[in-house]
Each structure stands twice: as structure tokens, then as C-alpha cells.
Image (tube, helix red, strand yellow):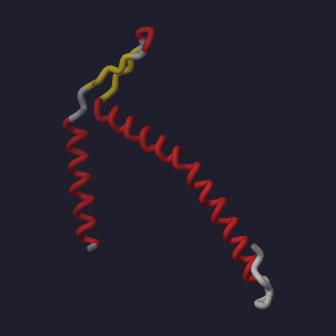
Amino acid sequence: MRYLTGLVKLILFVLLLSFAVKNTDPVVLRYYLGYQWQMPLVLLVLLVFSLGAAIGVAASLGYLYRGRIENQRLKRELARCRALPADHPPAG
């Protein structure tokens, strides 16, 4: 299984490397007021992919933070319930 995973990673790397080598043509990005920026196409694709991944991670941070707070609250409640004597009725 380890060899299969390594082979898949190697094939993916070769495919992405060949994509990068074939797409080195310059692309001009035009902004407002006549500003423009020239860069290789593969760099633009990498930049847009990275920006999209960063936005996706940032969008999920709120859910992750809320889940962590809920997990801490439940751990405190579990510790409090375990500390109660066995004959004590549960609070609730």
C-alpha cells in the first residue's frame, strides 16, 4: 500500500510538473486606471489556487472555533458529572 501511495504521488507530481513546464507563457492582468501586471500563466494558476485554499480555510475557522468551544464545555460537564457521588441524582 505504501508503494502504491508513493507511485500515485510521483505520477501526480510529474503531471503537475509537465503542466507547469507547458504553461510558462506570459499573461497580462489588467486592472482599473490602466494598471497591469504580467506573470507566467502557471504562476497565476498557482496564486489563484492558493488564494482559494486560504479563503476556504479562513471560512471554516469559525466552525472549527465553535466546535472547539463546545468540546471544552462538554469535557467540563463530563468531569463535573464524574465528580458527583453515585447516589446523587443528575442535574438537569
Q: Measured from the top left, where is residue 73 in percent x and y?
A: 70, 65
Quarter of the image for the N terminus: give it.
bottom left
Instruction: Give the quadrant of residue 79.
Output: bottom right
In the depicted view, which residue is nearer to us: 36 or 72? 72
Which residue corresponds to the image point at 27% horizontal and 65% vertical from the top-left? 6
Q: Measured from the top left, where is residue 70 in percent x and y?
A: 65, 62
Which residue corresponds to the image point at 37% horizontal and 17% vertical from the top-left? 30
Q: Measured from the top left, where is residue 21 in percent x and y?
A: 22, 39
25 versus 87 height, above or below: above
Quarter of the image for the C terminus: give it.
bottom right
Instruction: Give the quadrant of residue 46.
Output: top left
21 versus 37 height, above or below: below
Which residue corresponds to the image point at 49% horizontal and 47% vertical from the top-left? 57
Q: Measured from the top left, where is residue 51 in percent x and y?
A: 44, 38
10 versus 51 height, above or below: below
Left/right of residue 17 with respect to residue 29 in the rendered view: left
71 versus 87 height, above or below: above
Left/right of residue 84 with respect to residue 26 in the rendered view: right
For the view shown, which residue lies furthest in the bottom direction? Answer: 87
Left/right of residue 8 with respect to residue 71 in the rendered view: left
Left/right of residue 89 with respect to residue 37 in the rendered view: right
In the depicted view, which residue is nearer to us: 85 or 52? 85
Q: How many marks?
A: 0
Which residue corresponds to the image point at 24% horizontal and 54% vertical from the top-left? 12
For the view shown, which residue lies furthest in the top direction? Answer: 33
Instruction: Give the quadrant of residue 52.
Output: top left
